[in-house]
Image: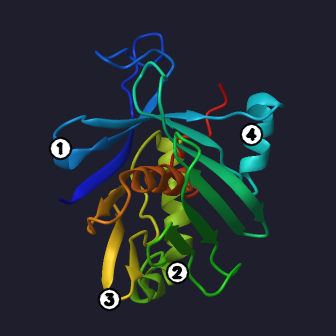
Amino acid sequence: MTSTLKVTGLPKGGSARPVVLPGVAEGFDHVVIDTSQGHFHVVAYLERELPAGGIPAYLSARKDGVRSFVLWAEPERRTRLATVVTTSAGKGVSAYQVWGGQGELIGTFVREKALSGKGLRTRWTVAQSGCPEAVGLKGRIFWWFVWWPLFPLWVMIGVGSAFNGGGDVPRGPRRIVWRAGGEAPLEYLSKDEVVVHAPWVDPRLAVALTAVVRSFDSWIGTPWDDKKK
């Protein structure tokens, strides 16, 4: 059955703190939901795993591509659904491992930023233990050729939106289709959703991929893990 996963923020209360919804523990402000299973069907509770230097050290390291997440199976933080750790990062290329709650390696991700790795587009490689490697490229070449010549216009629109206190800015092509052999097991849509097409994809890997990809939102986006508190 197809799953459609999305990172979403919890609504804020009057004190600018997340509203504590039924079944969601205080302290979480982002979760992964499966929209194909109904409105706000939570499958993971997201939390940064901070280094010794705390939030400042995390924010400094994330500029180089470092990520460290815990995906909890329940709001009480009893069970780790998965843990994402960085194995290497720098010069636009980052590698991650996804571990299960029993210490088993679920799979790996490699992100090669555009012009830093093997091509003109950002390249994502997803490898699940015992399964074929899946490779996806961010955006279609055609739409990049359409978008880049108009980049100065997008900047002007962005500046205008900032001064006016709102407004949408056209963003670069973001769709990613991961291909493994003759099939496309995973897909990232421009509306910030990861769709799981293949039944052999480990749900924990898919949830972790959703969290990692959304943490690399563009300069006009809102990465969920860059909060300063």
**Mark 4 vs mark 2: in front:** 4
Along the horizontal axis of the image, is 193 left or right of 82? left
Which quarter of the figure is the N terminus placed in? bottom left
Q: Amino acid at mark 1?
A: Gln
Dot 1, crowdedness within 10 Å: few (<14), some or many (≥20)?
A: few
Q: Secondary structure at mark 3?
A: loop
Q: Which mark is residue 58?
A: 4
Q: Is residue 19 left or right of residue 121?
A: left
**What's the distance in space between the residues labelled 4 and 2, CA to CA?**
32 Å
- Residue in the image at 41% along x and 11% along y: 14
Tell me if label 2 and label 3 are in contact, CB under 8 Å: no
Amino acid type of disc 3? Gly
Q: Earlier in the sequence, mark 1 or mark 4?
A: 1
Label ID, residue 37? 1
Query: Picture coordinates of residue 49 (x, y %)?
Result: 65, 35
Residue mark closest to the camera, 3 vs 1: 3
Q: Residue 154: give its label.
A: none
Q: Residue at position x 82%, y 31% from top?
A: 52
Which circle's residue, 2 or 1, is located before the other in the chain? 1
- Mark 3 to mark 1: distance in Å? 27 Å
Disc 1, SS: helix
Find disc 2 in the rendering and name its residue. 148
Left or right: 56 with respect to 110? Answer: right
Which one is earlier in the sequence, the residue at label 4 or at label 3?
Answer: 4
- For mark 4, does the 10 Å Cα neighbourhood hold few (<14), some (14 to 19), or many (20 or more) residues? many
Quarter assignment of residue 216:
bottom right
Q: Earlier in the sequence, mark 3 or mark 1?
A: 1
Question: Which residue is at the front of the view, 208 or 127?
Answer: 127
Q: Residue furthest top?
A: 15
Where does label 3 land, which residue? 182
- Tell me how far mark 4 sits from mark 3, CA to CA: 39 Å
